[in-house]
Structure formats: structure tokens, C-alpha cells
Amino acid sequence: MDTNKDGVISLDDFDDLFNSHGGAKMDTEIWDNLLHEADKNQDGVVSFSEFKESMASLLHRGLSKKRKNHNN
């Protein structure tokens, strides 16, 4: 996801990633909100440790929801 290989994920990286795969220009507000949520230290980019933490949280929430729905 770090398209410019600077060690962090930025809004420009998301835009580059999706445009390079033939996707339409992405709504920057959506990506800005996602980056803001993952950017724990509020420096405007997502470090690898912030990315790992966000993905772990996302997976945990998804698994918890799946288990809850399976038990009902």
C-alpha cells in the first residue's frame, strides 16, 4: 500500500494504489476518514505499527460480529 516506499501510508498512496489498478478516482473523504481513524498519533500518515494495530482491531471486530451472529 505504500506506493512511494517512504515507510508510511498517506492519502496519496491510496489514490496512487487504486488509480494504478484501473480503478476510478477514489472519494478522498472516505480515505481521509479511514486514515484519520488509523492515524493514532495524528501526524497525517499511517505508520506500519498503526496499520498493524488498525488491521488487528478490524479483524477482531469482524470475528466478534461473526461469532455473535453465529450464536443467534
Image (cartoon, rainbow, N blue to C red):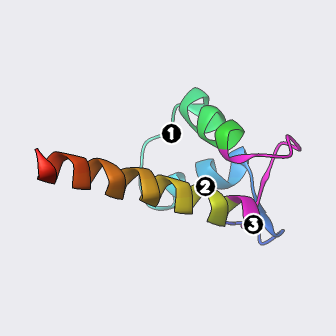
Expressed as whole percent of the image width and height from the top left, the position of residue 10 reads: 74, 51
In 3D space, how far apart are the residues under numbered discs 1 and 2 (Cα atoms)? 24 Å
Numbered marks: total: 3
Left or right of residue 58: residue 10: right
Secondary element type, mark 2? helix
- What is the crowding at mark 1: few (fewer than 14 residues within 10 Å), some, or many (at least 20)? few
What residue is shown with label 1?
A: 25
Expressed as whole percent of the image width and height from the top left, the position of residue 27 reads: 52, 31
Left or right of residue 72: residue 10: right
Residue range corresponding to the magenta coloring: 38-50
Q: Earlier in the sequence, mark 2 or mark 3?
A: 3
- What is the crowding at mark 3: few (fewer than 14 residues within 10 Å), some, or many (at least 20)? few
Camera-side residue of 46 and 62: 62
Quadrant of the rendering where the C terminus is positioned: top left
Secondary element type, mark 3? helix
Left or right of residue 48: residue 52: left
- Name the amino acid type tagged 1: Lys
Q: Earlier in the sequence, mark 1 or mark 3?
A: 1
| Extreme residue in the front direction | 71
What residue is shown with label 3?
A: 49
In 3D space, how far apart are the residues under numbered discs 1 and 3 (Cα atoms)? 27 Å
67 magenta-colored: no
Camera-side residue of 43 and 41: 41
What residue is shown with label 2?
A: 54
41 magenta-colored: yes
Q: Are marks 2 and 3 in contact (CB under 8 Å)?
A: no
Expressed as whole percent of the image width and height from the top left, the position of residue 66 reads: 24, 53
